[in-house]
Amino acid sequence: MQHFANDLKLNIFRLPVCWQYLVNNTPGGNIDEGKFAIYNQLVNGCLATGAYCVIDIHNYARWGGQIIGQGGSVTNAHLASIWYQLYVIIFSLKVVVTNLSQVPLGTSLNHESSLVS
C-alpha cells in the first residue's frame, strides 16, 4: 500500500474480508482472535500509510449461499453481530470507515435497507 499512497497519492483503501473467516464459519459467533490478528495486519498496514481504511465484509449479502435475512438460518442479527464486534475492536479509530452495502445480487432494495437498519 505504501507505493499506492506515496507514489500515486491514493488516500483510501478498501480492505475486503469474508465474515465467515473472522467468526470460524459460525453465524453470530465471536471473532476469532488469531484470524482477526491476521486481518488487523492489513488494517494496520493501511493506517501506516496515513490513508483511510474501508472495512468491507464482502460476500454479496450471503452466507454459504443463503441470502441474509430471507428465511434461512442466517439472520440480519448475525450480520449485525460481526459489525458490532468490529466496531468495538477497531472503529474507534477516526480513519476507519465501513462499507455497509452488501451488494445483494438478486435481492430487492427493500432487503438491502433492512440489512443496515
Image (spheres, rainbow, N blue to C red):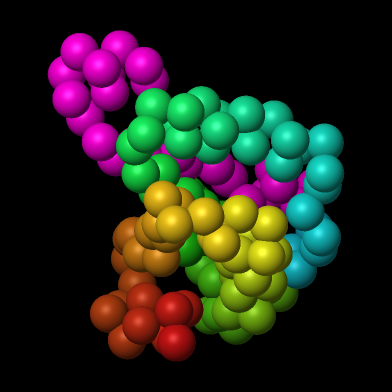
Point out residue 34 in the picture as x, y percentages from the top left corner: 82, 36
Point out residue 76 in the picture as x, y percentages from the top left corner: 58, 79
- Report which quarter residue 37 is drawn in: top right
Point out residue 60 in the picture as x, y percentages from the top left corner: 43, 56
Of all residues shown, which one is farthest toward the left?
A: 8
- Report which quarter residue 21 is drawn in: top right
Magenta stretch contains residue 8: yes
Point out residue 3 in the picture as x, y percentages from the top left corner: 30, 12
The quarter of the rendered structure image containing the N terminus is top left
* Residue placed most toward the observer, 6 or 83: 6
Is 107 positioned to the left or the right of 69 in the image? left
Is 84 positioned to the left or the right of 31 in the image? left
Q: Residue at x 36, y 16 (%)?
A: 2
Magenta residues, start to end = 1-25
Q: Residue at x 55, y 42 (%)?
A: 17
Can residue 82 be seen in the rendering of this structure?
A: no
* Residue placed most toward the observer, 33 or 92: 92
Q: Residue at x 52, y 68 (%)?
A: 67
